[in-house]
Image (spheres, grey):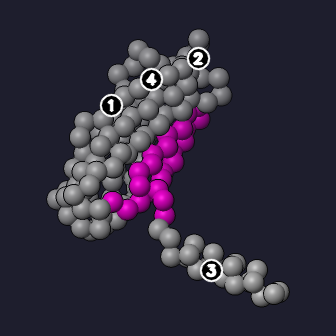
Amino acid sequence: METAPCICLAVLLSCAARAAPVAATAHEGGAKWSVDAAIPARIAAGDSAELTVVVSATDGYKINDKYPYRLSTSVDPPDLAAFDKAELTLARTQARFAAKLTAMKKGDVKLGAIVSLSVCTDKECIVDQAAVDVRVSIR
């Protein structure tokens, strides 16, 4: 009976070792902001997935709702997948982009995102740009 916990642990460790990463993520930070990107790490050819890019204001700063936030996306190699235009949602301390990616062919791709951003206090505004990259496997 004493071996049962060891067998269960061995099975769990074996399953965990074979499991694919749930999401491909990236993080970039400035003095008063951070940018996080996430998308499923594996996508089937012919399917689509959503890349989310979230700008968070920190240290008492807030999202500048008058700034024209922009997200530029890229796929390398470009023939494996394509992005639709990203949708933007603004809140007090976060700006969230959601961009649909359509996987067209099997292979490993590098997805790039460059976000133009601005965060403010009552006394100052910071305008900046951040770049994040994630790698995704299309199967």
Q: Give the Cα separation between the discs numbered 4 and 3.
A: 44 Å
Disc number lying in front (1 or 2) = 1
Depth check, mark 2 against mark 3: the one in front is: 3
Queried whether the magenta region covers residue 76, the answer comes back as no
- How far apart are the two marked residues, 1 and 2, measured between alpha carbons? 25 Å
| Residue ID for mark 3 | 11
In the rendered structure, which disc, 2 or 3, sits on the residue that comes first in sequence? 3
Magenta residue span: 21-43
Q: Which mark is residue 90?
A: 4
Residue displayed at 22% across by 58% down: 46
Residue type at numbered disc 2: Thr
Residue reaching furthest to the right: 2
- Mark 1 highlights which residue? 87
SS for callout 4: strand
Tell me which residue sits at (36%, 37%) in the image: 98
At mark 3, the secondary structure is helix
